[in-house]
Structures are given as structure tokens and as C-alpha cells.
Amino acid sequence: MMPSKHSIKDILILVRGAGEMASGVAHDLWQVHFRVWMTETPSPMAVRREVSFCDAIYEGEKHVEGVVAKHIQTADEIPRTWEKGMISLLVDPEAKSREILKPQVLVDAIMAKKNLGTKITDAPLVIGLGPGFAAGVDVHVVIETNRGHDLGRLIWDGQAEPDTGIPGEISGYTEERVLRTPTEGIFEARKSIGDRVNEGEIVATVDGLPVRTQISGVLRGILRNGTQVTKQMKAGDIDPRGVEASCYSISDKARAIAGGVLKAILIRFNV
């Protein structure tokens, strides 16, 4: 039997997380007129901040490719924020707001590589991004997040590929393009997103110790000043292609994952 049709305006979607991948998903769903709200931790630590709605927690609002997310204080404000044409972003790590609004779809886009509490009973359709979820057990469907032939694929039975721990390749570079902290402490950036950097350049410090680039390119992402970090934590992202505009646009990976989420919703609700 085919599922009954639903109107897009009747489908409420909760996206857990508001980092780069979660924001790519929310952006696409909002553009096709689903009503979306997002939940985050009080102090998110996104690297690609120019394409991550979680920065609204610090700035009040965040614009990503023409879509705006607004940081709100309570779940009661979510419908009013939608009426103003903005995605709602709520500090709600445990996603308790779902008990109030009762979404038809919950997308766990925290990208923690493990399940932090999402259950298959949380919504009529529960979607998990990447490793850490089992389709049919704790979510209804898993979206593959590893780059390659299966990126964005829907998995209705089983799990996504294990995390490789290796960043995606860009122009032949993988780990070399990632900035990592030399020690634990307070992160202080010397460069901004969009700046061009050279190999060996100091782009930040942690308690006085330098964070140096391994390759030249454009600084596509970097942690906020004053962030408390641990040793070897990802702190920045260099794009060796050197295209500044890429710093402010959603990545191909995020778009592919968002497409998978949208497809799962259309299959389930036949909108």
C-alpha cells in the first residue's frame, strides 16, 4: 500500500545539529517550503562557520546562501519565526522541543559518529546521517556520508560505512588541508575565513603555541576566537583550489546528503 499524501506545509521537520552538514540539509528543506527548526548545544564549535547556522547562537542570526536562521530562546517562538521567513535555532541538546511540536520528521545531523540519544520512536520518520545509526533499529533510514560512489545513498536496512578518519580529498590533499591544535587551551585566530594563506604560515595560536598551515590555499573555515580546545582538535580547513567564493557556499558533500534526506521524506510521505 502506498503511503497517503501529505502537504509540505503540514510536515514539521526537526534537524538535530546546526553545523555544516546539518545546515546544508536544513537549507535545502527550507527552500522547498518545509517548516524546519534546528537544535544545538550552547557552545557549538563549527569550523566552516560561514555555512553553518549554529553561528546564530553567537550572532543572533546567520545567513547562508539567502536563507536565515534565527536563534530563539523557547520552543513557543518557533511558529512566529517561521512566519517571519526564518529557520528557528534553539539551544536544546536533548531535542526536548520535539515533545511540544511533534515533528513528522527528525533528522539527526549531529555527525558525532555515534548515536547520542535519537530513537526510532521520536517521529514517524527518523533519519540518521552517517555512521553510528542502524536503519530499522534506532532510525528508519540512514544516509551515507562518506565521499565516493555511495555518498547520499539511502540505507533502509543496515548501517553507513565506518568513519575512515581521513578528510575528503581536494586537489590531492587530505589530512594536509586540516588545521589541528598543538595543545589544549584557548584558541586565538590570526586569520579570517576567506583569507589566502601560504604553506608554513601561522594562522592561529593555542596558549602561545602556533597553528601552522601545511599547504597554501584559501582559509575555508576556522574556529571562533576564544574557543576552548583539546590537543589535535580540528581547528581549520584550507581549500587548495584557492577559490574564495567556496568559503561562503554549501559544499558538494552537504548538498548530496541533503538530497538524500529530501528523497527519504518524499518516499515516506509521498508529497
Image: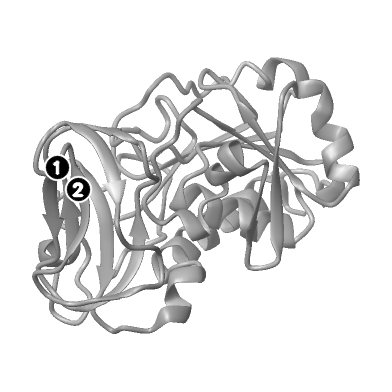
The three-letter amino acid code for the residue at tag 2 is: Thr
Q: How many marks?
A: 2
Counting from the top left corner in percent of width and height, residue 115 is at: 35, 26
Q: What kind of element bears circle 1? A: loop
Pointer 2 local density, CA inside 10 Å: few below 14, some 14–19, many at least 20: many
Task: Residue at 34%, 36% (x, y): give it.
Answer: 227
Q: What kind of element bears circle 2? A: strand
The residue lying toward the viewer, choosing from 98 and 229, is 229
Left or right, 3 with respect to 135, comes to: right
Is residue 39 placed above or below 164 in the rendered structure? above
Give the residue at mark 2: 205
Left or right, 119 with respect to 219, comes to: right
Is residue 220 placed above or below 56 in the rendered structure? below
Left or right, 266 with respect to 252, comes to: right
Q: Which mark is residue 208?
A: 1
Q: Are marks 1 and 2 in contact (CB under 8 Å)?
A: yes
Task: Residue at 22%, 76% (x, y): give it.
Answer: 170
Counting from the top left corner in percent of width and height, residue 99 is at: 69, 15
Residue at the outermost front position: 208
The residue lying toward the viewer, choosing from 230 and 99, is 230
The three-letter amino acid code for the residue at tag 1 is: Gly
Quadrant, the N terminus: top right
Counting from the top left corner in percent of width and height, residue 249 is at: 51, 71
Task: Residue at 67%, 55% (x, y): give it.
Answer: 29
